[in-house]
Amino acid sequence: MKTSNLLLATQRENPSDAETISHQLMIKAGLIRKVASGVYNWLPLGIKVLRNVENIVRQEMNDSGAQEVLMPMVQPSELWKETGRWQQYGKELLIFEDRHDREFCLGPTHEEVITDLCRNEIRSHRQLPITFYQIQTKFRDEIRPRFGVMRSREFIMKDAYSFDLSEDEMNDSYQSMREAYIKIFDSLGLDYRIVKADSGAIGGSDSEEFHVLANSGEDLLAFSDKSNYAINAELLIESMSDQNPESLEGQDSPDGKGKLRLKRGIEVGHIFKLGKKYSESMKLTIQTEKGNIHPEMGCYGIGISRIVAAAIEQNHDEKGIIWPKEISPYGTALIEINPKSDTKLKTQCSEIYNSLKENGHEVLWDDRDQSAGVKFSDMELIGIPQMIIIGEKSFKEGKVEIKIRGEDKITLLNLDEVINKTL
Ligand code: ATP
Ligand code: MG
């Protein structure tokens, strides 16, 4: 892609309503724009990052044996009344009526719809275990949308649902999804932790959250300094008489090993053992040799759009974003510094650009008629992991400059080395 053809919507001013660094940088780098409170446009650079995250998640879901489906965003009230959540879910459920006065909601999650799908489609116990997933837009009418896409009302989630014949098998499905999550967050290049969590409005017995560590995180996490014990501190705080997180700073770890240490995190994934909550209330029954049973379910969410913001919280400096390679919108920025519009230099840029592309690299060629300063600061702001700089002086010597984002050092390379060396 050439910047002359790209909607590069960078801006220098800090948006007045952005409190967190990721929110500020997502606006300044031209990744997102607000349409309404908690509702955003994704611009060309932003959607590329979002798709990269999505693809990593999709690949691991497919590898784990889960099958992709796509369920509707609009859900009929009847299904939610069967589980009782039409009343219980509260004000985050955005409800409306169609022209025939039928009630609907915008899906904040899809347990009802998937359980309905399974009770209609699963014919035999031989089809179990089975896990479905989708990558789809959710709507939750959050009381205080904030921090851009970190806590928005409309957001993209990967949600998966497993169905098993016994609790043991459900534990296996849960474990295999947990392993897939570990691969996903490793591939995303993020520093994360898994903690024991509360099941909230989704319900079920056991659950764990995946948190990207960041000082701006909304969640307080507690870790033992002597064991693997890790928990969302809200679970401990609920049971404390003073309910004061401060009194957790050095307390004994509940597993009896070591003292508690606190860190802040951004919840990017949540996995639940649901048991029979939905299969019983919605009468999903499967015939087996031992009679009819209600399957054991699990459900597994990943906040795809929140991950983009979380990755920025963890990877930035005063100049802007520093994308982990795996999710960067482009791997390389080709910067042409050509104040005299030298056609030879332009041809050389074009050759490098084409050969990098032919070798499968995602390159953003900054071919604008702008000063070197503007180009550097834009490419640094949008966080491209490496720059190839083609300037008059080095070009005359048959060389180009390579600069890695986040490092000060500039390396000189021979023109013909560029393609092999840089990537
Ligand atoms: P939170 O505690 O942050 O409100 P949750 O526990 O209600 O989230 P889940 O129901 O577990 O969320 O949803 C699965 C994942 O979807 C979360 O782990 C999170 O990454 C993402 N998510 C949830 N709510 C939002 C939101 N308002 N904006 C962006 N992502 C969200
Ligand atoms: Mg959660």
Image (cartoon, helix red, strand yellow):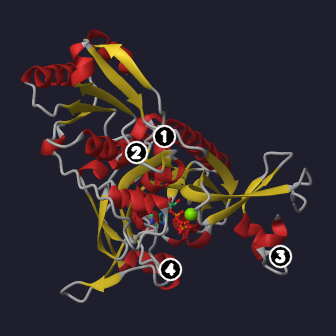
Whether label 1 touches label 2, CB < 8 Å: yes
The percent coordinates of residue 387 (x first, y second) are: 34, 31
Which residue has dot 3 on it? 240
- Quick check: marks 4 and 2 in contact, CB under 8 Å? no
Q: Are marks 4 and 1 in contact (CB under 8 Å)?
A: no
| Nearest-to-viewer mark from 4 and 1 | 1
Q: Which of the marked residues, 4 or 2, is nearer the chain's N terminus?
A: 2
Q: Is any atom of residue 33 visible in this view? A: yes
Task: Where is residue 161? Give x, y as percent.
Answer: 48, 54
Measuring from the top left, give residue 99's x and y in whole percent. Answer: 18, 86
How far across and how far down the image is residue 115, in percent?
44, 62
Amino acid type for the residue under numbered disc 3: Met
Q: Real-space Cα distance between discs 3 and 4?
A: 26 Å
Verify CB contact (< 8 Å) between mark 1 and mark 3.
no
- Rendered residue at 35%/83% (across/down): 95
Label 1: how many Cα within 10 Å (few below 14, some 14–19, many 20+): some
> Which type of secondary structure does the marked residue at label 2 adopt?
helix
As shown in the figure, which amino acid type bears the numbered disc 4? Tyr
Q: Does the numbered disc 2 mark a residue whose Cβ is under 8 Å from ligand 1?
A: no
Q: CA distance from mark 4 to mark 2?
A: 29 Å
Determine the image quadrant of residue 336: top left
Nearer to us: label 4 or label 2: 2
Q: CA distance from mark 3 to mark 2?
A: 38 Å
Give the Cα separation between the discs numbered 1 and 2.
7 Å
